[in-house]
Amino acid sequence: MKQILNRIYHKLVSLLFKKQLVDYIGVKNIITYFFFQRILRLNSHVKWPVHWSSIVSCPERITLKYWRPFPGFMPGNYIQAKNGIEIGKNVRIGPGVKIISSSHDIYDYDLHTVENPIVIGDNCWLAANSVILPGVELADHIIVASGAVVTKSFLEGNCILGGVPAKVVKKINNYKGDIKW
């Protein structure tokens, strides 16, 4: 009986959601995200799964080169895209990451500054609690270490950034992995 109910449960989920999404997130997580986003209406304005403890503002200004990553998917993310955010393929966004595309105007806190959009290249990894600030552009295959605050652009890829403000702490070789989905 349990197997039959389990099979019905999985069939229902696969009818409602893309197979790629089910394979990537898992059935239990899809139900959780569905409950918080569609029933409790937390981040309901966002078209992709967002963790209930994360905030995504201006999702219509976020451009993804690939269907994944889901900005805000990990716990405690703050993604603010007033000036736009462009995210490349195979990007990993860890828990607690902040991506902030606009600051408050220093002469009127009710206004936001106009900056270039944030651009994150392919095969980048934003580790836990890292911060990307307005106008930053990251080349392909850059790893931002945990707790780093990126205040300026890094146009040469294949490196690890760390510190406050972030600087290159190590050069690395080309990315060798591939996109699984």
Image (cartoon, rainbow, N blue to C red):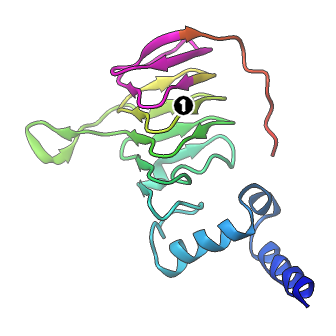
Left or right: residue 107 versus residue 38 is left
Residue positioned 50% across, 54% down in the render: 75
Residue positioned 44% across, 33% down in the render: 118
Q: Is residue 167 above or below residue 23?
A: above
Q: Which residues are magenta?
A: 143-169
Assign the N terminus to one quadrant of the image. bottom right
Residue 172 x/y as whole percent? 64, 11
Queried whether the magenta region covers residue 161, the answer comes back as yes
User: Which residue ends up furthest to the left in the rendered image?
Assistant: 107
Residue 27 x/y as whole percent? 74, 69
Q: Give neighbour class at mark 1: few <14, some 14-19, many 20+ (Cα, 10 Å).
A: many
Q: Is residue 173 above or below residue 27?
A: above
User: Which residue ends up furthest to the front in the rendered image?
Assistant: 2
Queried whether the magenta region covers residue 159, the answer comes back as yes
Residue positioned 34% across, 22% down in the render: 164
Q: Is residue 152 above or below residue 82?
A: above
Question: Which of the 4 quarters of the picture holds residue 91?
Answer: top right
Left or right: residue 122 versus residue 3 is left
Residue 57 x/y as whole percent? 40, 55
Q: Is residue 17 above or below residue 175?
A: below
Nearest the viewer among 100 and 3 is 3
Residue positioned 55% across, 44% down in the render: 63
Question: Which of the 4 quarters of the picture holds residue 114?
Answer: top left
The amino acid type of the residue labelled 1 equals Ile
Residue 74 x/y as whole percent? 54, 52
Dot 1 falls on a residue whose secondary structure is strand
Total numbered circles:
1
Q: Which residue is mark 1?
A: 120
